Image (tube, rainbow, N blue to C red):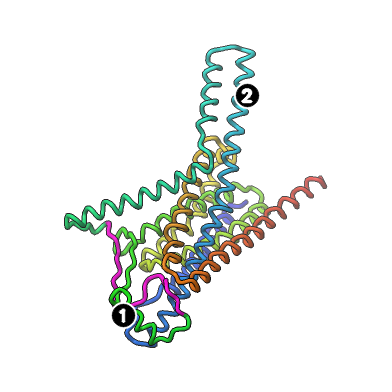
Amino acid sequence: MMLWADVIAAVGVFLVLSLIGAIPFCFLRGGGHNPRRKGVRHQTNRSSVVLSLSNCFACGVFLATCFLGLIPHIREHELKIRTRLEKEETYKLANLTMVGTEVSHRETVTHSQLLRSLPSSELIVVMGFLLILLIEQSVVFCQSNKKKNGQVPRAVKTAVVHEETEEPLVMTDMNFMESPDADESHSHHDHGGHSHHHAIVLDSNALTLSSMLLLFGLSIHSIFEGLALGLQNDAGDFVRLLIAIMLHEVLCAFAFGLSLAQQKAPAGGGFLSICFLSACIPFGMCVGFLIPAAGADADGTLLARYALEGLAAGTFVYVACVEMLSSELGHSHDRSGLLKAMFVVFGVITFLIISALSKAEREGGSDLHGAADHAH
């Protein structure tokens, strides 16, 4: 492809993903309304319901991204690596039989050890989950010790939101049949008119740790998607793959914007993270333009992708299940909990539909190539 076309595609991807991520963040993040006014309070209550259900939808998207998107890719990488190691081991054994040198024997033992010591896909994902768990709890532990000593650093602190007569950051009690007056009365009795929301933040103007972990997982996935795009030499293949990738990347960007809105991320940090995520695919494309196709499929690159995508999948599991899903369903009544669960299912189904469209687009390109080759 021509360089200018690649640049236009990269800029277009960045702009589209930035816009898609910013839309839910802007409209659902909410403003500084005064909750003591009944009309505003009722509107805030309704907005909290929408935000909570949207967050459940995003949770379903992230779960599907992990189990239906990343993990199958990780297993493919594992199969590729094991196949290569087995082929190299067979080749070295053949040389050992023919030549019988000590060097060949050493190389054969090395490949056998690598084959046996390579962790499975499932273990890599679990390691990613445990790593994120240890990181978050280490931050909590260090910060609690600082608090005991009366030293709360500016860089790391836990946001405990005490809002008199205000709605919680995540709506956990959706009483659809109650009147605004009943809601107001209810809010004064629960926790003495205070709502509590715990979130680890790195700064008052920064993202929560949960959002940063989610950004890490999504960005790793996006960079490798962009790398696959950048390695395409045929214009038709590039366009078909671009459409296929953008179908589900748009969904992930939208879900990330929903998650930022739920976390009440500051405007500056939220927009910066959306732009960072949107730039990951163009960055991967640029890397793909600069390296040959053989280099992208080299052993070192394949191992790095296997490890990084495995850790990213573990991050998705942790953020979706431990952070997002538990906060939404932990204190819900039966009625609201069932509705939230349905929105999680809706998120998974939406991802499945988008994935099916993406797969059809890729297979359509392969069929066209096969027909062209047959004609020649």
Q: Nearer the viewer, mark 2 or mark 1?
A: 1
Name the residue nearer the viewer: 268 or 106.
Answer: 106
View extreme (left): residue = 150
The amino acid marked with disc number 2 is Thr
Left or right: residue 234 compared with residue 30: right
Question: Any mark on residue 258, and which?
Answer: none
Residue 215 shows up from this direction = no
User: Dot 1, how many residues are within 10 Å of its Cα: few (below 14), some (14-19), or many (20+)?
Assistant: some
Left or right: residue 197 compared with residue 358: left
Element under label 1?
Answer: helix
View extreme (top): residue = 100
Name the residue nearer the viewer: 367 or 316.
Answer: 316
Element under label 2?
Answer: helix
Q: Residue at x 55, y 68 (%)?
A: 342
Quadrant in which the C terminus is drawn? top right
Which residue is disc 2 drawn over? 90
Residue 38 vs 300, above or below: the answer is: below
Q: Position of residue 137 (x, y in %)?
A: 33, 51
* SS assignment for the magenta stretch, majority: loop
Residue stretch in magenta: 156-175
Name the residue nearer the viewer: 307 or 8.
Answer: 307
Which residue is disc 1 drawn over? 188
The quarter holding residue 155 reads bottom left
View extreme (right): residue = 375
Q: Residue at x 70, y 53 (%)?
A: 363
Q: Position of residue 234 (x, y in %)?
A: 66, 49
Q: Position of residue 310 (x, y in %)?
A: 50, 45
